Structure formats: C-alpha cells, structure tokens
Image (cartoon, grey):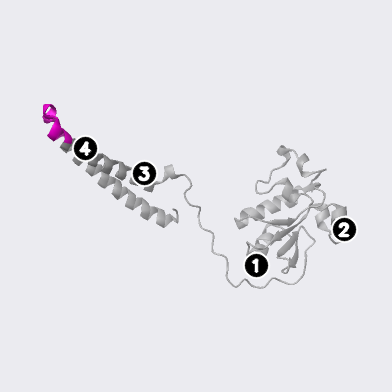
Amino acid sequence: MPTLSFPTWRDVPEKAWRWPSFSPAEIACRGTGAIKINTEAMDKLQALRDRLGKPLIIRSAYRSPEHNRAVGGAPASKHMQGTAFDIAMSNHDTVAFEAAARAVGFLGFGYYPRSGFMHIDLGPARSWGDPFAARPVPFAPELPPAREVLSESRTLRGGGAAGAATVGAAGVEVLQDVLAETQSTIQPLVPYLDTLRWVLIAIALIGIAVTIHARLDDWKRGQR
C-alpha cells in the first residue's frame, strides 16, 4: 500500500492530492503538522464520504510518534501509519456510519461515545469500547439539492414574463390616456396602442400560467 510522507501538510504537492472532500491539513498530525498519506486508507475514506453523502468531521488522522505518545495513543497505533481516522458522530447515525465504513473496507472499529467519535482503520478486524446509544431522533433523510442557478428556474422565467408584461400593459394604458387627451395630432395611433395593451395582457396571463406550472414542478422535485 503506497505511503507518502511530508514534513508538514503545506509541503504536499497539489498534484499528489486526489481526495476532493478532504484537505492535507485535516489529515496531518495535530501536534506537529507532519503528514503521512496512506493512499489506500485515503481512497476508502473518500469512498465512505461519497457513500454517506455528508461531511466527515475528522478529529484525528495521522499522528507523529511523539504526538501519539503525548496524547496517550497505543504504542502501535494505526494512526502512526496513516491508516486510521477518528470521525465525529455529531452529524451521523452511528449504525449507518459503521455499516457504510464496513462496506467500503474498514475493518477496525473503536467506539468512544463519551467523546463523541468513532475510530476506523484498515485492520486487522476487531472492535473495542462501548457501543453508542441509539439516537432518540433519527437524522432526516437527505433531500435533493435545491436549484442553485436562479436563471435556470422556470418559476423565475414565468414570473418575470408575467411581471414585465403586466407592467408593460399598464404603461400602455397610461400612454394611451395621455395621447388621447394631449396629443391630438397623433390620435390615429391610439387604437393600435389599445391592441398592444391586450397583447401584453395575454402575455402576462401566459406567464402566470407558466409560473403556476413551474411551482408545481419544483414542489414535486423537492426544489425551491
């Protein structure tokens, strides 16, 4: 299993980092800043992140030998090999998390409910600690992301069309009244303005219909 070591996380070349959900600073030793990257372990960590679909808050990853001693880690801790991670459970259901971690290939599990994290590593297969208590209120299921680009929303386009057409129709009505009362020399244009007003009103009604349809479509898709 390939392993890369660097004096600090800042020394990691950008081209050597291929795990988009994490940064070298998250994986580096909390005490010294040194980093050891076990690519197999990092691949499994990224696979776990992708499988769960929510952030992994890393409490501890690589530990230098001196930092491992300082925090009272096991003499042969997997953290010193870069193959272990302590993950906070504040945003995870522990049962679902462990099942996903096992599915992507993690074999060692340590439970630390009082400290609020779970240890996972590449093995050998084993477990220790007291299991987490069942969460009284389960996490809500993940929903599809809301529309982020407003210009792509049919609701916005429909509402814009309706609004613009309504304002335009009102403007034509005002202009028609002004021309009828004060501009007798261009009185023949007034009937055409009346026709234009009704055209704009028709566009406004179409825009409102599009808006209602888009609202229903967005609601069905779980989008805003």
Point out which mark residue 157 bears: 3
Upstream in sequence: badge 1 or badge 3: 1
Give the class, few, some or many, for how many residues have Cα within 10 Å of label 2's Cα (few <14, many ≥20): few
Which dot marks residue 172? 4
Q: Nearer the viewer, residue 154 or 101?
A: 154
Q: Residue at x 38, y 46 (%)?
A: 156
Determine whether the residue tagged by mark 4 lies in a helix, strand or loop.
Answer: helix
Q: Name the spot of residue 152 as percent of width and height, x first.
A: 43, 43
Mark sitting on residue 53: none
Viewer-nearest of labels 4 and 3? 4
Q: What's the magenta region?
A: 178-192
* CA gap, disc 4 and disc 3: 22 Å
Find numbered disc 1 in the image and state the secondary structure of the residue it sits on. helix
Amino acid on which the number 2 mark rests in the picture: Arg
Is residue 98 depicted above or below 164 in this figure? below
Q: Nearer the viewer, residue 208 or 171?
A: 171
Amino acid residing under circle 1: Val
Q: CA distance from mark 1 to mark 3?
A: 44 Å
141 with respect to 79 (left or right)? left
The answer to if 187 sits in the magenta stretch is: yes
Query: Which residue is pictured at 84% across the width and 52% down the height?
Result: 64
**Amino acid at circle 3:** Arg
